[in-house]
């Protein structure tokens, strides 16, 4: 049982890293949202979305991570990212209108 506990502790550490990386990714995406707003770039860029999903799936597959799972995962991450960017831009636009 101690081996199982050790493995679970290792998984918990990996999960912590995943959450930390997602938090970093979303923080950068907020910066991207500000940049896009300043430069008149659309939040959703379908070509970029497909590029990211394909790049990640291509990287995951040789490491034994299921391609379909990776595509689904990145679809969810990117959907949340786009929502975050819209929220940031909405807040920034409202701030500009109040001035």
Image (cartoon, grey):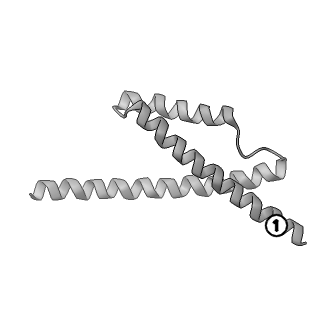
Spot occupied by residue 56 in the image (x, y as percentages of width and height): 50, 35
Spot occupied by residue 31 in the image (x, y as percentages of width and height): 69, 55
Spot occupied by residue 93 in the image (x, y as percentages of width and height): 82, 62
Q: Say which quadrant the N terminus sits in.
A: bottom left
Residue farthest along the right direction in this orientation: 99
How crowded pointer 1 is (Cα within 10 Å; few <14, some 14-19, many 20+) is rated as few
Q: Residue at x 28, y 53 (%)?
A: 11
Q: Residue at x 70, y 42 (%)?
A: 44
On the rendered structure, is 93 left or right of 70?
right
Residue farthest along the bottom direction in this orientation: 98
Q: Badge 1 is on which residue?
A: 94
Residue farthest along the left direction in this orientation: 1
On the rendered structure, is 47 left or right of 11?
right
Up/down of 57 relative to 94, above or below = above
Up/down of 87 relative to 74, above or below = below
Q: How many marks?
A: 1
Q: Say which quadrant the C terminus sits in.
A: bottom right
Quadrant in the picture for residue 69: top left
Observer-nearest residue: 82 or 20? 82
Up/down of 50 relative to 39, above or below = above
Quadrant in the picture for residue 66: top left
Q: Residue at x 82, y 66 (%)?
A: 94
On the rendered structure, is 43 left or right of 54?
right
Observer-nearest residue: 5 or 75? 75
On the rendered structure, is 4 left or right of 67?
left
Quadrant in the picture for residue 3: bottom left
Spot occupied by residue 63 in the image (x, y as percentages of width and height): 36, 32
Badge 1 element: helix
């Amino acid at each position: 049982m101690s081996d199982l506990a050790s493995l679970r502790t290792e998984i918990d550490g990996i999960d912590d890293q995943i959450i930390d990386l997602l938090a970093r990714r979303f923080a950068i995406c907020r910066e991207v949202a500000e940049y896009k707003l300043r430069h008149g770039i659309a939040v959703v860029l379908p070509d970029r979305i497909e590029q990211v999903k394909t790049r990640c799936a291509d990287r995951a597959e040789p490491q034994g991570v299921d391609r379909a799972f990776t595509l689904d995962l990145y679809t969810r991450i990117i959907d949340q990212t786009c929502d975050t960017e819209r929220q940031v831009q909405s807040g920034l636009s409202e701030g500009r209108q109040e001035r």
